[in-house]
Amino acid sequence: MLPFQERVELTQLNTFGFYSIAERYIKIESVDLLQQLVDHQHHSTDPLLVLGGGSNLILDDEVPGIVAHMRLRGKQLLKVAQDEVLLKVSAGEAWHETVEYAVNQGFYGLENLALIPGTVGAAPIQNIGAYGVELQDRVVSVEVLDIHSNSLHHLTKDQCQFGYRDSLFKSLDPGRYIILSVTFALTRNPTPQLDYLALKEQCEMLAQGVTITPKHVFEAVCAIRQAKLPDPNHLGNVGSFFKNPYVDPSTYAQLMESYPNLVGFVEADKYKLAAGWLIEACGFKGYRSKSVGVYDKQALVLVNYGQGNRAQIEALAGQIYRSVLERFGVALEVEPRYYPALILSE
């Protein structure tokens, strides 16, 4: 018999802090137990939610079926040779603590991704990124359990089909794979990535005239994020709520004519617009509706002031979406995942 618990509250297991009840809950602390669960699912019609840190989820009041809470732990050094380091990290490890561990060990490459909430297992799904670095830049492989065959596999970075805040696991074949661990290619050669001016300036202030190190980058990223983004332990949120949208050069030129202060960045043959700027320009920064709102320091972040719920966030997100579309002709895309899935009406 699988050790299911009935009617388990998930309020402390999602960073929005929404009150939510799982019909059934199971804590996964071994691959063997996970495979038993998958075998059970082959003979069941119950929906299955694999839960990590709950940092990219918008949960409903009731979560039907089974919630499997991934608690696989452990780190393993697979290779340390000259400048090259291969570090394998289990899915249940906290992401920020993993970044901090790597920096303290002198293993570099993840420091720009400090203080992002969630677990290691959730990071590839979203292909998390910040300050000029994306997870895919450091991934070698992702160990997964294929639900269809209940077998273990190692997917290469190319097989993960990473995109901007996207991956095989999120859009192309959602629900098929459960991530067990991620192997990262890191370096012992300190090469700070300082493409963002605000990050560079913060590092220079911390370094005080000496050479900037990855440790300075780690500390600078933490300082910037703490100044701009709310701590989910004190104010519920999932970080950036909308993706930064892309537009073609013609659309960008037209927008710049009407809005000379528009914030955008060229990437290959497209332009990435700052979704936070668009939202703030529509007057939503600091806006509050019932128990949810838009953070007063960063318009890209929606927050739960307490007693908020999914329905309120859906309504607020829809209001923002329509306003930005009407004013700029740009359609925003929600970054976190609604669960159960959001059903759009015609």
Image (spheres, helix red, strand yellow):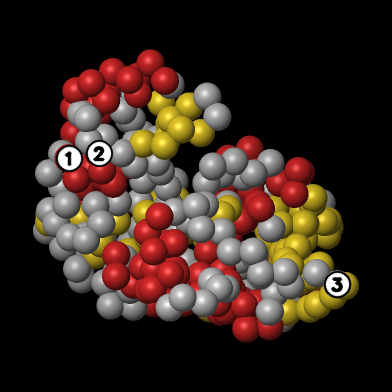
The x and y percentages for residue 332 are 34, 36
Amino acid type, label 1: Ala
- The C terminus, quarter of image: top left
Q: Which mark is residue 177?
A: none
Mark 1 sits on what residue? 281
Which of the 4 quarters of the picture holds residue 231? Answer: bottom left
Identify whether 232 is placed above or below 196: below
- The N terminus, quarter of image: bottom right
* Element marked by disc 3: loop
Amino acid type, label 3: Gln
Mark 2 sits on what residue? 278
* Element marked by disc 2: helix
Residue 97 in view in this figure: yes
Marks 3 and 2, how far apart in space? 46 Å
Give the crowd class for mark 2: few <14, some 14-19, many >=20 residues within 10 Å: many
Q: Residue at x 29, y 65 (%)?
A: 228
* Element marked by disc 1: helix
User: With 91 as the anchor, is 203 left or right in this view?
Assistant: left
Q: Earlier in the sequence, mark 3 or mark 1?
A: 3
The one nearer the camera, 211 or 77, is 211
Mark 3 sits on what residue? 82
Give the crowd class for mark 1: few <14, some 14-19, many >=20 residues within 10 Å: some
Q: Residue at x 76, y 44 (%)?
A: 159
Whether label 3 touches label 1, CB < 8 Å:
no
Amino acid type, label 2: Leu
Residue 117 in view in this figure: no
Marks 3 and 1, how far apart in space? 50 Å
